[in-house]
Amino acid sequence: MTAAKFVVNEVKGYHGFVKFLILLVVIAALASMVRFVFGLGATTNMNDTYPWGLWISFDVVTAVPLAAGAFTLGAIVHCFHIKKLEPLVRPAIVTGFLGYSLVCVGLLLDLGQPQRGWHVMRYWNLHSPMFEVSMCVMAYTTVLFLEFLSPVAERFGWNLSLRVLRWLEMPLVILAAAISTLHQSSLGTFFLIAVDKLHSLWYNPLLPLLFWVSAICSGMCIIIIEATSCHKWMGQPNEGVLLRTLAKILPWTLGLYIALRAYSLLALSVGPFFDRPVLTLLFVVELVIGFILPFFMFTQKSVREDDRRRVIAASLVVFGLVLNRFNVSMFGMMNPDQIYYPSIVESLVTIGIIAGHILFFVLIAKYFPIFEHHPETVDYTIPGRIRKSDNGAEPVSEQS
Amino acid sequence: MSKVNTSKNNAFLIDMTKCTGCRGCQVACKQWNQLAAEKTEFFSGEGYQNPPAMSEYTFTRIKFRDYQKNGQNEFAFYKEMCMHCNDPACASVCPVGAFKKTAEGPVIYKADRCIGCRFCMIACPFGVPKYEWSKGLPLVKKCTGCYSRVLEGMKPACATACPTAITYGRRDEMIKLAEERLAKHPNKYIHKVYGKEEAGGTSVIYLTSLPFNELGFKPVTLRPLPDYTWQALRMVPAAFLAVGGGLSALSWITHRRDRLKHEKAAEQVDNPAEEKED
Amino acid sequence: MTNHWIDIKHSDVIMCIGSNPAENHPISFKFVEEAMDNGAKLISVDPRYTRTSSKSDTYAQLRPGTDIAFIGGMIHYALSNNQIHREYVVNYTNAAFLVSEDFNFNDGLFTGYDGENFSYDKESWAYQIDKEGRPLRDDSLEHPRSVYQLMKQHYSRYTPEKVCEITGTAIQDYMEVIRTFCATSKTDKVATIMYAMGTTQHTHGTQNVRSYAMLQLLLGNIGLAGGGINALRGEANVQGSTDYAILYHILPGYLKVPTYDNKDLSSYNAKWTPKTNDKQSANWWSNTPKYMTSLLKAYWGDAATEKNDFCYDYLPKRSGNYSFIKLMERLQTGGFEGLVCMGTNPIVGGPDASSIANGLDSLKWMVAADLWETETSVFWRRPGVDPKTIDTEVFLLPAASSVEKEGSISNSGRWVQWRYKAVNPPGHAESDAFMVDQWVKNLKALYKKDGVFPGPITDLDWNYGDGHEPNIDMVARECNGQFTRDIEIKGKLYKKGQQVPSFAFLQADGSTTSGNWLYCNSYTEAGNLMQRRGLDDPSGMGFYHNWSWCWPVNRRVLYNRASVDLNGKPWNPKKPVISWNKLTRKWEGDVPDGGWVPMSEDGTKSPFIMIAEGYARLFAAGLADGPLPEHYEPMESPVANAMTSQQSNPAVSTPGKIDNSGKYPYIGTTYRVSEHWQAGAMTRNLPWLVELVPDMFVEIGEELAEWKGLKNGDMVTISSARGSIEAKALVTSRIKPLRVSGKMVEQVGLPWHFGFNGLATGGSANMLTTAVGDANTTIPEYKAFLCNIEKGGIKS
Ligand SMILES: Nc1nc2c(c(=O)[nH]1)N[C@H]1C(S)=C(S)[C@@H](COP(=O)(O)OP(=O)(O)OC[C@H]3O[C@@H](n4cnc5c(=O)[nH]c(N)nc54)[C@H](O)[C@@H]3O)O[C@H]1N2
Ligand SMILES: Nc1nc2c(c(=O)[nH]1)N[C@H]1C(S)=C(S)[C@@H](COP(=O)(O)OP(=O)(O)OC[C@H]3O[C@@H](n4cnc5c(=O)[nH]c(N)nc54)[C@H](O)[C@@H]3O)O[C@H]1N2
Ligand code: SF4
Ligand code: SF4
Ligand code: SF4
Ligand code: SF4
Ligand code: SF4
Ligand SMILES: [Mo]
């Protein structure tokens, strides 16, 4: 059986939803080819008034905080040493790694000269938040990749690597948190330059801090959503108890965020604030539904302990974050006489990226041990699981 | 951020009271930079204004304002172009440093560096950098300040073509000239040298007899824009160290506490678990 | 221009009337701005609020074709308020002259009118003369028959109220213009008038110009720095082309074309050499025989001898009017077999253009020499015409543009500047000089074989080297003129073949040649003065005498002897053009208008040396339509003449395609925009300019637009008795309805640059204009006609 045939047969066996996701990804891949052939102007609705469109607003500015679960959880688990949350870490890392990889893909499509992406490393501009973010995203994707290597190494029984990775775990976690802090906040710094462009409801000097804190909140909420969905649709064990712990942290971070927002708006921003009704509405929806409401929900024990209500609250935060990022990077800079909306190609690509994310997560979960791993009980010196693996690799003694 | 002596570098003094809207500058710019004509239709804006906006093909443009004020006609013209900021936002945000404020004054763009992120377009407070939207691998386009001419001791093409309104020379001298004009004709001009302080000072400065907002000038901050991001960015090393160090310390403490707990537990159990390597 | 471009900076008041220099003469604005920096006031008088108006201190709107009323009111104000420069007026103009008792003006008609021929017998328009034949004068200006009093009486009807009723100007704007302008009657204040086609393109265009000149004379503003009346010439070298006789009635240097009754040179000289009995008058035109003989010598060289009247017989004699409009009328009746169009595009630029286009259909052949394919050269392809039905054979000769050839160019300020060839012409393009050279050489060869009356061609002295191109340097030398034999003049010996130093040395005996007496001094033994590029300006007055060369004899300001008082002291000592140095007994500054001593001394000459009597003419008997400008309505007008019962200029016959019935209610006027050039071939084919003004438009006031339900950019149809065109509506408050004779009159403005051929195409405004011209110059009345406007494109 040739490899191709094997793949075809394998794919044939997939669930219909997965096939649908594959279709979406393929369409997105085609759409992105169209972009290179016909140029950004013909395929997207970006123009000189809106040089950044859906791809930057969603694929970068929003996707990055949504992938913040990995570093947040890493720090919680390893640094704050709340070890019982460990089972959530690997899926979070996979999500993060996929998230960042797809950010890179999105960026490559969006860049005018993607082949020159490496220039960032060649010509440094320390004054550029974009430089900072690019370096961080590259570094962090590498870190996530290394972290993600653990299940891969496990899967293939590369014990030596596993040991190295295991040894690297703590430094990586810390590095991840530090790097993430920088670029999550620097995404906010992007818009500090948009003085006189970004509406005062969002423009304030604390944008970087706000971006960071909200990324932490949404990172945790994404984990809640992800674990809940994995339980519901992928037959994984219910991690509800663990999620309760996260839900207990959330009122604090959300509370901090809301306080910072209030402070920045009242003390650091200069009006006019409510001169444009649409923006006022967006602002209210974002803040009330996306942050204040879930804050109150998470303060309720009943919400924290109820799988369904907890995931609703988490979803609200994710919604709030997405809306916030769009408000900052798109709506808040929109000129009422000339509205931007994404083109079909842009939308297809973004849909494809989201689909790709879910698809790859599902596939990775299918082929790699990301849920089984419970490090407290694993003895790394004896690659016990490896014997069980289907490729039947010989156990290698690392002690020799 | 820039180390350029911005009072000695060159600047444009554009006196809109003297601009006749002849658009010689607009055509001279296209000619010097060999920019393609745009396909236009009728007039896109007031008066005879065309093309609709600055673009990859149009580095400078005369905006027309045709309106009535106190029953009197106003027909005003204003030249849009790169302001060649003293401390350019475009240069500060570019991840690969493709923009540079030169000692001669023009803010130039090194096309071979650009990765095409378009952050410069977001950053520029005057909406100057434009993009080659029609291309597969597009680049940014904007007024070059006619750097190649300036290096050869010539004036920019637009300033050369202009019969009346543009004076080109050392920035401090242009500001002096502008202030002299304000002093000499206090009733003619709005008492403001636009660009002296806007966006931290620019190398294109304007005088006018009509309020700047009536002419469609967007209000811009007086602070150099790079300051706004730098106040956050300069904290990057500190933030990195604080988070990295803080978390390291935290985990050292938590792990120690954990280990101690384990050891205590192990003492009670007969066969202690092998110590982990971390 | 009496003055020159740089000189505008010396003005205290600049009135742009009938011109739009910000758009059409952008460089002039450099000097307008400079004047304004020094406190000058700018006045713009125009039916439309233009880019020039936008720079002005005072804008006055007037109805197209009403300049005489507008200026008449200013003259009335100056005279009735004694706001004139009296000393100047008395001593330098004919204000004090007494006019014949027979002269009269009654209800729009001067004495001597012949209604059948639309002309005047000018006999009564004369001065009273003394026994020696010199005009009688009254320096007190009180005599009822003095020019001054006649003028005062004539313009007493032009009260501000009456004027504004005619012109539609808001009275407060009008009064502001008057006060600002007339304030320059002070000796040390000076105003200039910048005028162009808004002035001249009327059936009374010449009288419009006259009215400006009279106003300037009354205020003592002519001859001074920053003064004068300045015709902003149009085409880059149109000054040169008129100097070199592009018009049918003049020879180079404005010598008259002989008429059929000038049988020989002496009768020609007798007819056209002005005479005076006033010894104080220089009467420069008394040199006419010298200039004419030198011209004939330049034409026919050695063949021109005293014995054969210097080949005077070879000159064509005219028996009628061969102006553009007349030629086009003849074309339409099939009067021509062939047509040579060198650098002109009449079916876009000519009045009633579709009639001209139809006329072309009857041609057997056409030769067009142009940089581009023009509408005229592809007239057989015009919309609505089947090319198969047209038999004309058309030759398009690609021409070299101005930068692709060498030669002189005369600007509006009479500066003749040498241009060098910058690049070779593309493809097979050749200079016009080459084409003409080839024609002449071939004609000569053909006529040598046989032909009726071959002399004028075969004897033509045509030797400009053996190169591919005629040698332009040799042409320039010939234009200046040379000595044909060794001769002593004013005690100095000149050798045969030497360049003549200046026109003062030209002779009537055949000892000199000169292709154009006005240019005699441009190429002397010192070399080609047109090539000079000296940047020195010792007087600081911007004369730049060592920059190129200026006719006449490098004089930068004409009539500059009127800029000083009787003792030779400048009226405005701060801005002297010339001044008399009592010690050296010489004039300093510009080249004076003749070096004679000041007026207070013996042996002087009056300053207006080109006028037979030596005094500037406030009362001018030479024109076809009256000695004093009088307001008449344009040929097509929505109102009745409020001044007299003469509706339009009585010296202009009423042509056929005119409709005053009310069917066409709106005033139409045509104009230029900065972005396009003339009939458009040179700009509508250039993408960078097409981008700026891509299509034909019509400027419509907001009220009319609302009434017609028009928005900016809507397509409209504009029609007149001559035809209809489409255009996009440009709705703007810059063009406003006028209150005229108690009713509101709407006007619309159309650029005339568009046509059916080229990169940018659009309706030609000249499909609407009237083919009727000025009484003196026959320049068409492009600036005022009647039209109608309808929403939507032409319905076919
Ligand atoms: N860009 C550009 N420049 C040009 C040309 C060109 O085609 N394009 N053409 C050149 C040539 S050949 C010429 S002759 C000159 C002509 O130069 P201008 O005479 O300045 O040109 P126009 O725009 O035809 O007319 C001038 C103004 O006269 C106004 N006008 C119309 N009727 C009247 C009236 O009755 N009285 C008064 N006072 N004003 C009136 C019109 O509204 C117009 O604004 O321009 C030269 N310069
Ligand atoms: N309605 C209306 N009509 C008008 C006017 C108006 O105000 N209103 N203005 C009138 C006036 S003032 C003028 S001057 C006329 C102008 O009318 P035209 O003279 O007919 O118009 P242009 O477009 O100037 O024509 C000049 C042609 O010469 C060509 N050319 C340029 N350089 C050279 C050269 O070196 N050699 C040769 N052989 N050809 C060359 C150009 O390509 C162009 O086609 O139009 C008149 N028509
Ligand atoms: S105007 Fe914009 S593009 Fe020009 S230098 Fe300033 S920031 Fe840069
Ligand atoms: S688009 Fe190019 S020039 Fe602009 S910021 Fe990005 S890399 Fe720099
Ligand atoms: S400086 Fe040069 S590039 Fe910039 S607008 Fe002027 S001509 Fe164009
Ligand atoms: S060239 Fe000068 S006068 Fe003409 S539009 Fe440009 S700035 Fe204004
Ligand atoms: S059109 Fe030519 S001649 Fe006229 S102002 Fe412009 S450059 Fe000078
Ligand atoms: Mo003209």
Image (cartoon, coloured by chain):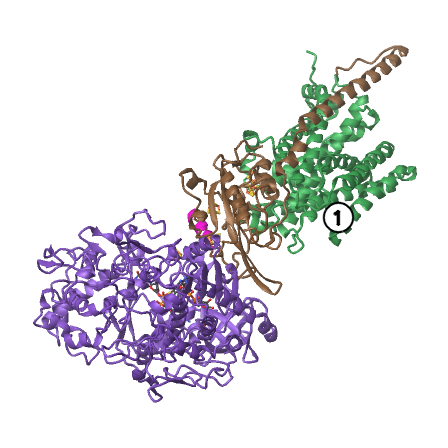
Chain colours: A green, B brown, C purple
Q: Quadrant of ligand 1?
A: bottom left
Q: Is residue B136 left or right of residue A375?
A: left
- Magenta segment, prevailing SS (helix, strand or loop): helix
Front-most of residues C34 and C347? C34
Could you tell me which chain the residue with mark 1 belongs to?
A
Q: Quadrant of the C terminus of chain B?
A: top right
Q: In the displayed image of the protein, which residue is found farthest to the bottom?
A: C116
* Above or below for C386 versus A237: below
Front-most of residues C532 and A264? C532
**C506 is within the stretch colored magenta:** no
Q: Is residue C87 visible?
A: yes
Quadrant housing residue C236: bottom left
Q: Position of residue A99 (x, y in %)?
A: 69, 37
Residue tagged by mark 1? A273
**B24 is within the stretch colored magenta:** yes
Q: Mark 1: give few (<14), some (14-19) or many (20+) Cα within 10 Å.
A: some
Q: Tag 1's secondary structure? A: loop
Q: Position of residue C652 (x, y in %)?
A: 37, 82
Mark 1 lies within 8 Å of ligand 3 (Cβ measured) = no
Residue drawn at x 24%, y 77% as measured from the top left: C133
Q: Is residue C755 visible?
A: no
Quadrant housing residue C301: bottom left
Front-most of residues C189 and A44? C189
Q: Quadrant of the N terminus of chain B?
A: top right
Front-most of residues C713 and A384? C713
* Above or below for A100 versus C709: above
Residue drawn at x 54%, y 68% as measured from the top left: C173
Q: Position of residue B35 (x, y in %)?
A: 45, 50
Q: In the displayed image of the protein, which residue is found farthest to the right?
A: A302
Q: Which region shows up in magenta?
A: B23-32
Q: Position of residue C571 (x, y in %)?
A: 38, 59
